[in-house]
Amino acid sequence: MVRIMALDNPVLLVNLIGTGMYHDLQYEQWTALARARAIENEVHVIGCSHYIGEIPIAYAFSPQGQIVIREKNRYGIIGFDIELAESKEKKTGYLNDRVAGCFGRLCE
């Protein structure tokens, strides 16, 4: 689904997780997948999760997969700056190989 959305050239993908992280492995998996989405779509990806009694998390990755923030077990507001213009640059060019017509069946 993210690959289809990326065809519209967004500058930011947001993943608000509706449940908490229940263990450290889940935290590692969520952040690894978010970083992968940032890299393959060359767009900033941010996300957070908070559920009472579970592990709160927040993360942000640059279009090159660099960590902007990666926090767990921290409550409250977390501020950070990102340069959205980086998402427009598409330095790596992965999106150029994506043929929009090949995604039709995925949208059905």
Image (spheres, rainbow, N blue to C red):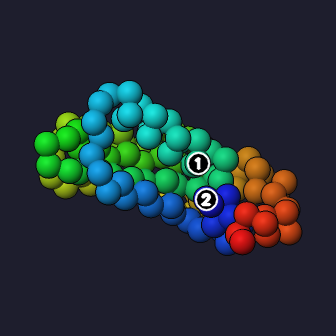
Residue 81 in view of the camera: no
Residue to which mark 1 is pinned? 37
The reply, left or right, for residue 76 in relation to residue 30 is: left
Q: Badges 1 and 2: C-beta atoms under 8 Å apart?
A: yes
Q: Earlier in the sequence, mark 1 or mark 2?
A: 2
Report the side of 63 relative to 59 (left or right).
right
Q: Quadrant of the N terminus?
A: bottom right
Label 2's element? helix
Residue drawn at (38%, 27%) of the image: 25
32 lies above or below 25: below
In the rendered image, residue 54, in percent from the top left (x then y), is placed at 20, 41
Q: Quadrant of residue 11?
A: bottom right
Q: Looking at the rendering, which quadrant does residue 81 occupy? A: bottom left
Query: Measuring 70% from the left and 69% from the top, which residue is drawn there?
Result: 107
For this rendering, which residue is in front, 74 or 18?
A: 18
Which disc number belongs to residue 2?
Answer: 2
Give residue 50's position: percent from left, percent from top. 23, 51
Residue at image position (58%, 48%) is 37
The spot of residue 59 in percent (x, y) is 37, 46
Relative to the observer, which residue lies in front, 48 or 53?
A: 53
- The answer to whether any part of residue 85 appears in the image is yes
Mark 1, Cα crowd under 10 Å, few <14 / some 14-19 / many 20+, is many
Q: Quadrant of the C terminus?
A: bottom right
What residue do we see at 36% from left, 35% from top?
A: 27
Horizontal side of 95 relative to 60 (left or right) equals right
Given residues 8 and 66, the one toward you in this image is 8
**Three-letter code for the amino acid on which mark 2 is drawn:** Val
- The amino acid on which the numbered mark 1 sits, given as a three-letter code, is Arg
